[in-house]
Amino acid sequence: MRKFGLIGYPLGHSFSKKYFTEKFIREGIPDCTYENYPLTDISQLHELLSDAELAGLNVTIPYKTAVLPFLGRIDPEAEAVGAVNVIKIRRYGDSMELRGFNSDIYGISDTLKPVMKQGTGKALVLGTGGSSKAVCHVLASMLIDYRLVSRNKKAGCLTYRDLDKNVLGSAALIVNTTPLGMYPLTDGSPDINYDLLGPDHILFDLVYNPEITTFLTKGREKGCIVLSGLKMLHSQAEKSWEIWNSDKY
């Protein structure tokens, strides 16, 4: 039996177990299971790894950065992002090596490229966590200027109070990388003036449960193009499966 799973905390919002369980049935993939592993502390990963049948893990909030010291090898793109959401476990007798990757990059890119042309427009990235780093990496690769937005004043970041008519008006793309609006607290949304948004704006929410968040609903009411996190999740999940099963990784 080959075991895969998701580490993070809490995991009530996760779609991964359902996605991979259905994939294994639909595609006739035998002897594979996918489970949620809610770890209250990243140190609990040591005990989890003692299961010799565990072959790969996805990583979600709050461990995309905290997991880095556990890894023997990190893919250059994941290292550039500074966050990992896929771990490939290679076992050699009594020893093993953990290899870290970032499949969020592929999911974000697959979502944005159909609607954003390379080098056009500016972007605001709401949040500064691990997912934000992946978004910024993709935007930089697309030659799109972006600015980070944080609740608290930080070097190189705007705050929500700074998002006036001029700042919002110059942003073609606004990406929410925070958990605001995620189930079960679905009424939450980033603290921006939605009255300043219109048809020239694209709103992308990395939250996928619910598929259409309050952030996207408010944007849609103002005529914005809205992108849910669901396509990103499907793309990054398939990339995870490729990483776990391909010898090139």
Image (cartoon, rainbow, N blue to C red):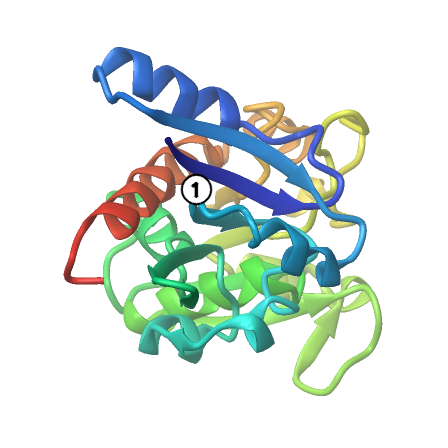
Question: Where residue 23 sits: x, y (%)?
Answer: 32, 20
Instruction: Work out which residue is located at the far front of the displayed protein and give it.
Output: 94
- Examine the rendering and report whether any part of residue 84 can be seen: yes
Q: Residue at x 66, y 36 (%)?
A: 215
Mark 1 Cα-neighbour bin, 10 Å: few <14, some 14–19, many ≥20: some
In the picture, the quarter occupied by the N terminus is top left
Please identify the quarter of the rendering in which residue 12 is found: top right
Question: Where residue 142 sits: x, y (%)?
Answer: 28, 67
* In this picture, residue 13 sits left or right of residue 191: left
Instruction: Provide the secondary structure element on which disc 1 rests.
Output: loop
* In this picture, residue 183 sits left or right of residue 244: right
Above or below, 83 against 176 in this view is: below
Going by the numbered disc 1, the residue's amino acid type is Glu
Give the residue pinned by disc 1.
53
Q: Residue at x 48, y 46 (%)?
A: 201
Above or below, 84 against 6 in this view is: below
Q: Residue at x 38, y 50 (%)?
A: 108
* In this picture, residue 233 sits left or right of residue 148: left
Q: Nearer the viewer, residue 214 or 211?
A: 211
